[in-house]
Image (cartoon, coloured by chain):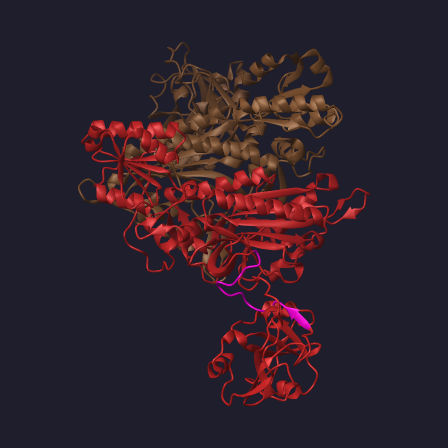
Chain colours: A red, B brown
Amino acid sequence: MRLSQFHLRTTKETPADAELVSHQLMMRAGMIRKLAAGLYTWSPLGLRVLRKVESVVREEMNAAGAIELLMPTIQPAELWRETGRWEKFGDQLLKITDRKEAQYCYSPTAEEAVTDFARQELNSYKQLPVNYYQIQTKFRDEIRPRFGVMRAREFLMKDAYSFHISDEDLVREYHNMHAAYTRIFTRLGLEFRAVQADSGAIGGDASQEFHVLAESGEDAIAFSTGSDYAANVEAAVAAAPAPRAAATEALRKVDTPTQKTCEDVAALMGIALQRTVKSIAVMTEGGFVLALVRGDHVVNEIKLAKVPGLAGYRLASEAEISQHLGSEPGFLGPLRPREAIRVVADRDVAAMADFVVGANEVGYHLAGVNWGRDLEEPETVADIRNVVEGEAAADGGVIRIGRGIEVGHVFQLGRKYSEAMQFSVLDENGKASVPAMGCYGIGVSRIVAAAIEQNNDANGIIWPVPMAPWTVAVCVINPKNDAQVAQAAADLLAELRAAGVDAVLDDRGLRPGAMFADIELIGIPHRVVVSERGLAAGTYEYRARRASEAENLDKATLLARISA
Amino acid sequence: MRLSQFHLRTTKETPADAELVSHQLMMRAGMIRKLAAGLYTWSPLGLRVLRKVESVVREEMNAAGAIELLMPTIQPAELWRETGRWEKFGDQLLKITDRKEAQYCYSPTAEEAVTDFARQELNSYKQLPVNYYQIQTKFRDEIRPRFGVMRAREFLMKDAYSFHISDEDLVREYHNMHAAYTRIFTRLGLEFRAVQADSGAIGGDASQEFHVLAESGEDAIAFSTGSDYAANVEAAVAAAPAPRAAATEALRKVDTPTQKTCEDVAALMGIALQRTVKSIAVMTEGGFVLALVRGDHVVNEIKLAKVPGLAGYRLASEAEISQHLGSEPGFLGPLRPREAIRVVADRDVAAMADFVVGANEVGYHLAGVNWGRDLEEPETVADIRNVVEGEAAADGGVIRIGRGIEVGHVFQLGRKYSEAMQFSVLDENGKASVPAMGCYGIGVSRIVAAAIEQNNDANGIIWPVPMAPWTVAVCVINPKNDAQVAQAAADLLAELRAAGVDAVLDDRGLRPGAMFADIELIGIPHRVVVSERGLAAGTYEYRARRASEAENLDKATLLARISA
């Protein structure tokens, strides 16, 4: 490929509406052009990157045994009514009326369409398991499309749907897809984590999101330095605390006239915040409950709601607090309530000794409190707090909190769609059986933007090799004036291509500064300059995109460096 | 690939709504499944064929210097209003209103979107010429979608658009694309013709359609056995007639009391129909005109309308005929009109001698009529008739009339879109210049159906190798019961794949009859059977899809036969 025969148009200006660096750089590199809100044309340069991502996804899906098909983007309302999603999906579903007044939508996802296909095609357990996938344009009518292709309305997605005779087989395929996704993002050269999303009542393993790590990510995720463990901050779990130490202090009452927070109490007493306990009073169907977390911790509402009996809890009113504890917020604690109460202690609180809590008496706290001695062991011990950056992870590593961009998800759907659409196959005993389903998505176009968020510098994009529009740019100084240099560059290009390296020749005849700026902006991993002076010395000027300096290398060293 | 790991589902039933054999066979082979009217899911089998066509199209477009990009399927109404097509395109344009009440359409073609891209990207003649293409889903809201993917509403199309600083350069690229299309359809193994469509006032070379020849084609096309000349029947031109013979008969009046047609007159007189002349009386802006074609020919309204002065002509009324000729239909002719008239003679009529025409007197014809002697030479001589199967073509061959399925077109658009959208670049002199445009379409999904229309038999599809889902099917008899046979088949598969042959293993364990029926139905070009008996004899049973008999071949011969 010669750039003079290609269409490359970079700009120095950053569009005013581009907030994210990936959006800015994709516009400046000329990868995308806006057609309308949330609608982008992928230029020849952008499309090269998009197709490389698509190829890796396709290869790994095929290798994992999934089978590609292609469903229409326009889908009839009747199908979506079968599952109730015609109404429930909300305004992101682009609804369309055709010339005959029939209703359709532009597919944002294809559970209905694939289940319709499956119920036409599959009638026996012998045909299962099967995993169908497509790489197809999708549409979501975002209320506020922005961030370029990161949250476009029209986008390219790989969506896969598997069908199984048993739950166990669904779990097997779920792990198979998890492994395939890990290979995909690893091959793409991205730093990523498979994140345990909060998955409600289904169980923690039924859903995971794949996030590309980047500071600009919308989601806070916690991950461990000790393994590939990662979770949404809301779902992350730290290491269990060390066993409780023995009591060393006597229980005593402390004057805290205006100290209503753990921070204030700890400051007044001159002790570490970690020695105080925060009491959160809530109302549940079963009555009043006092939840306890360490003073330096934050209660996690999702985890708390998962404690048996606490689903649908709400914060207690001052009247309810007064009724059960005889006190006011700021001075609450598990000791000496007015009525018997249920106590739910975070794991860390249950492991504390000699701690400080509110005295259930305005103006006072209690210090030197110890479980079993001063009050009964807590009725419930559970993980009900957010993890904290730097604390110990369950795998022996340290917990880090970062930000991620969701680029994939794997999900055990169960029988929600197959049941609603009355899809069954005959099992081994000749009985109708509703297949379990899994679904597995990858945001192909979003990966392009996410990769840039993770890999860029002041000069532009830094592509991982597998996603780069070209691996190597061969830059020619003065191609029109120096036939010998032009020929040497063409020879090098041919040699690289023969070695299977995706190389491009920059024969546009730009001045070196402008040429190099373009090549850096568009993120080519390896740059080689062919010049008269270099040829005379038998060398090529080489610079890796991340390197700070260029080097003069002979051809053998150059080729070795590029293929390394 | 092993069929046991693939999704293949053939059926014996032909759906009631499938009229065309391609639709029937695609349904029976399980290549497509209907989601709604004009909307089809491409099954894994169908998609393999679609992708093979797509690949050939992409490779040849790239080789021809076109550059791929990707435009959104959903496009804003404003763009379409700039060219007036928002209203003019008609009901095939699927119009969409989003959640913010903004209007969009699902792109049926992309002249507006690509011109919008070009005017953002191009500002200098130095960036021209350029030819952008995409392979993208399109939508046309057909009033009566039918024939499966032959006339689906959602379909896959390759659309290319070129921009040029001069008309000459547009013509150069038009020929370049014509050559690329010829390579594409040749590589796909299809019988096709590049057909000169009627192109109105632009000139005969400004538009050509590529048709796959098939009896079921919607369009009648004329082509020559002497070259690759082909044209819509309406636009086809035959060889010029031989020079006029000398007069041998005297002019005489013939009694034809009830003979009002050339056929009746010829029968009465006992002469060949070719010696009679048909007179068609029409009114034009310039007044009354008598058009003459040979008695065995049919006047071509499009050609007649192109004769200078005849644009917008209509048939004359009986009153007008009476006024100008003093006669009635059935007895009209160019001699002895009541008022002076203009005569337009077909080329063949102008070359006739001793011919028969109406006498402009009820009940009479004139025979032995000769130009220059009995009446003036015709004012206008032109080709104003339809060609006839079997007559001489201008290139020395014979004209044949067949039917074709349009699968591509190349078109010189000129400046219609670039002017309407105010797109200009600076020319060599620094002046604004509106680029000329060409557009070049290929119906990728339609090619799949057209290929089947052209290549099928009672047993199913017969794929040309480049489009086949697999080139070779290796069929195993009793794979589960005979490990040795299964291993030999797997070895052969590996050997074929190593030789670059796209082969599939039918290891489903079906009975031979059912297995062979499937493999024939889905049109695999080469079938190889691995059996215990064959292995004992050191042979494989081989049958080409079009062959009537199977043969037992040793491996070397087998491999040679497949790669031949």
| Residue at 62% across, 51% down | A111
Name the spot of residue B383 as percent of width and height, x first.
39, 25
Magenta region includes residue A468: no
Q: Nearer the viewer, residue B548 or A512?
A: A512
| Picture quadrant of residue B453 | top right
Magenta region includes residue A384: yes
Name the spot of residue A115 as percent of width and height, x first.
66, 48
Residue A148 in the image: above or below residue A315? above
Q: Nearer the viewer, residue B499 or A400?
A: A400
Residue B375 can be seen, yes or no: yes
Magenta span: chief secondary structure? loop
Name the spot of residue A382 as percent of width and height, x first.
64, 68
Q: Which residues are magenta?
A: A380-395
Which residue is at the far front?
Answer: A248
| Residue at 24% across, 44% down | A514
Q: Quadrant of the C terminus of chain B?
A: top right
Q: How many marks?
A: 0
Residue B457 can be seen, yes or no: no
| Picture quadrant of residue B562 | top right
Residue B262 vs residue B148: left or right?
left
Residue B364 in the image: above or below residue A424? above
Q: Nearer the viewer, residue A63 or B261?
A: A63
